[in-house]
Image (cartoon, rainbow, N blue to C red):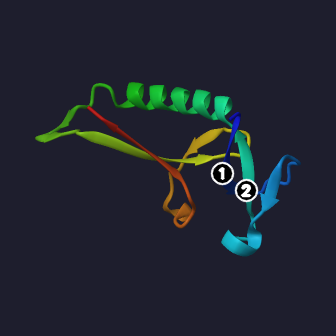
Amino acid sequence: MDTIEIIVADTGEADDRKALGRFVGADAILARVPIDALKANLRRLATTITETVNGIETVGRFRLKEVTVQVEVSAAGGVALIGTANVQGKGALSLKFSE
């Protein structure tokens, strides 16, 4: 299997996709995302998150046990952190890092 089907925002780019607007939202499509691209981008993001939180194991008397991030996936396999509350209700991939 070279691809995985993921519901993503419709950017208008032509690819192997199916419109899902009437089912999940006007701008949603079912896209075949390249697994190799998704894997490489998730690995790059995980490395960056790990490097970012390294060294902040404790804050005051509190200990950091885990970090959870929400990631949006593009039709091309790109990933982007979800950083605002304005995207509530959108689907996302949750990554949970534990020590």
What's the mark number on residue 56? none
- In the picture, the disc for residue 30 is 2
Quadrant the C terminus occupies: top left
In the rendered image, which residue does mark 1 sit on? 6
Mark 1 crowdedness (10 Å alpha carbons): few <14, some 14-19, many ≥20: some
- Residue 67, x across and y down, in percent: 34, 41
Three-letter residue code for mark 1: Ile
Query: Can you say whether 23 is above or below 37 in the image?
Result: below
Looking at this rendering, what residue extends furthest in the left direction?
A: 61
The numbered mark, 2 or 1, whose residue comes first in the sequence reads 1
Residue 6 in the image, given as x and y percentages of width and height: 65, 51
Q: On the picture, is 47 further left or further right than 90?
A: left
Q: Residue 89 location, x and y as percent?
A: 54, 67
Q: Residue 3: image x %, image y %?
A: 70, 39
Snapshot quadrant of residue 39: top right
Task: Check the picture and name the quadrant holding the N terminus.
Answer: top right
Is the residue 11 above or below the residue 79 in the image? below
Q: Secondary structure at mark 2?
A: strand
Check disc 1 and report its element: helix, strand or loop: strand
- Residue lying furthest bottom in this view? 22
Q: Residue at x 47, y 31 (%)?
A: 46
Q: Are marks 2 and 1 in contact (CB under 8 Å)?
A: yes
Q: Amino acid at mark 2?
A: Leu
Packing grade of label 2 (10 A; few <14, some 14-19, many >=20) is some
Judging depth in this view, the residue of 80 and 2 nearest the camera is 2
Count all numbered tags in the image, as a single digit: 2
